[in-house]
Image (cartoon, rainbow, N blue to C red):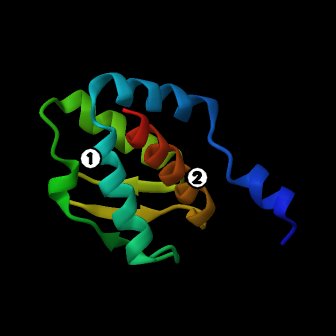
Amino acid sequence: IDPQTWFNSAELLEHQLLLLLQSLERKIVSQQLKLVRTHIKLGSFEDEPFHVDARLLSFPRREEQSLTMDLVKLSGVKLQEDGLAVPMERPFKAVVALYIALYVLNLLS
């Protein structure tokens, strides 16, 4: 695959950038990073649903959970409160781009 094509397909959406900013303001980037890291470690980016630790979706406020679920959904993985993760369309590149953004934000915060 052409590197430029890969990069363009792995860019974050503008809406994701806004959600990342909200995450930074709410100081939940570290927990989101752990959640996304779990996705990558599982390597379950086929068409099959997989489970992540539901505790990583437990936030002090409901809005933070919704924000996180929306952020990950924009990368192609629909999360449910019980930890079930349902890949929508081969999300590996998009999830990796999200992971990198969260990693950098976590380092800077």
Task: Please give left or right for residue 75 compared with residue 27 in the image.
Answer: right
Instruction: Estimate the x, y position of residue 11 in percent, counting from the top left.
Output: 68, 46
- Few, some or many residues within 10 Å of mark 1 (<14, 14–19, 20+): some
Q: Residue at x 37, y 28 (%)?
A: 24
Instruction: Estimate the x, y position of residue 48 in percent, counting from the top left.
Output: 44, 77
Residues at marks 1 and 2 touching, judged by CB atoms closer than 8 Å:
no
The amino acid beneath tag 1 is Gln
The amino acid beneath tag 2 is Ala
| Mark seen at residue 97 | 2
- Few, some or many residues within 10 Å of mark 2 (<14, 14–19, 20+): some
Task: Please give left or right for residue 33 compared with residue 76 in the image.
Answer: left
Q: Is residue 84 above or below residue 55?
A: below
Query: Which element carries disc 2, helix, strand or loop?
Result: helix
* Residue receiving disc 1: 31
Q: Quadrant of residue 43?
A: bottom left
Sequence-wise first label, 1 or 2:
1
Q: Is residue 58 above or below residue 79?
A: above
Task: Please give left or right for residue 36 compared with residue 84 in the image.
Answer: right
Query: Which element carries disc 1, helix, strand or loop?
Result: helix
Instruction: Estimate the x, y position of residue 1 in percent, counting from the top left.
Output: 83, 72
Q: Is residue 56 above or below residue 84?
A: above
Q: Residue at x 68, y 53 (%)?
A: 10
**Which of 33/66 is in front?**
33
* CA distance for labels 1 and 2: 17 Å
Image quadrant holding the C terminus, namely top left
Whether residue 102 is visible, yes or no, is yes
| Mark seen at residue 12 | none
